[in-house]
Image: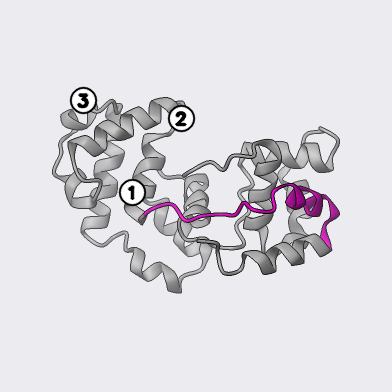
Amino acid sequence: MRPPYWDRARRALARRDPVLAAIMRRHRQAHLVSRGDAFATLARSIVGQQISVKAAQSVWQRLAGAAAVTPQGIGALDGGALRQCGLSGRKAEYLLDLAARFADGRVHPARWSGMDDERIIADLVQVRGIGRWTAEMFLMFNLLRPDVLPLADLGLQRAVSLAYRGGRRVSEATLVRIARPWQPWRTVATWYLWRSLDPLPVEY
């Protein structure tokens, strides 16, 4: 489903930024889509850390075959069972911590609708294995928050470098400055800049 703000954001960004307008014209039919439920999205982000997309998919399929990918299903496994799915010992610990926090309410998705982005990020980074970048991807791809700017994202840095700086390196301060006119639609701008590098959307 297309986010309800998508078309309004596109029009606003096209008026303010001719570089983005040109990128958006090349990808008229594509849009951001929410990816699954909260627990599964975060679990998948942990599984995929520092391994290839193909390897992550293989591990994910084995994990889904071993248990329901829910806090209760994953929490019922032990570290050995998770390692048999192809997870490292550390990632097994991360998944069990994530499951425990969902199960006991320390991570409680129902309350996020009333929280701003930074408070949700603060909630998520308490979970072992989830840093700010992962939390930002969650805000964008699961909660469909419209104004996320993932400054540490290498793809965004490269896209801005190529589109706005002639291939020169982009500092975080420069990225913030270039992105200022995109507010309050920086998620949308980021998503289209990723498309300028790769037309196929990545799932998180």
Q: In this view, does 16 lie to the left or right of 51?
A: right
Looking at the image, residue 5 sits to the left or right of residue 15; the answer is left
Residue designated by label 3:
84
Given the image, on which type of amino acid does mark 2 rest?
Answer: Val
Q: Looking at the picture, how far across and down is residue 39, in whole percent? A: 32, 52
Under mark 3, the amino acid is Gln
Is there CB contact under 8 Å for labels 1 and 3? Answer: no
* Mark 1 lies on residue: 40
Residues under numbered marks 1 and 2 in contact, where contact means CB atoms less than 8 Å apart = no
Q: Which of marks 2 and 3 is nearer the N terminus?
A: 2
| Whole-number angstrom distance, CA of label 2 to CA of label 3 | 19 Å
Q: Nearer the viewer, residue 4 or 26?
A: 26
Coloring applied to the structure? one colour
- Residue 81 visible? The answer is yes
Q: What stretch is highlighted in magenta?
A: 16-36
* Residue at position x 38%, y 47% in the image: 42
Q: Please, is residue 114 above or below residue 151 in the view?
A: below
Give SS at disc 1.
helix
Is 51 in front, or is 8?
A: 8
Which three-letter amino acid code belongs to the residue tagged 1? Answer: Ala
Residue 53: image tag: 2
Q: How crowded is mark 3: few (under 14 residues within 10 Å), some or many (20 or more)?
A: few
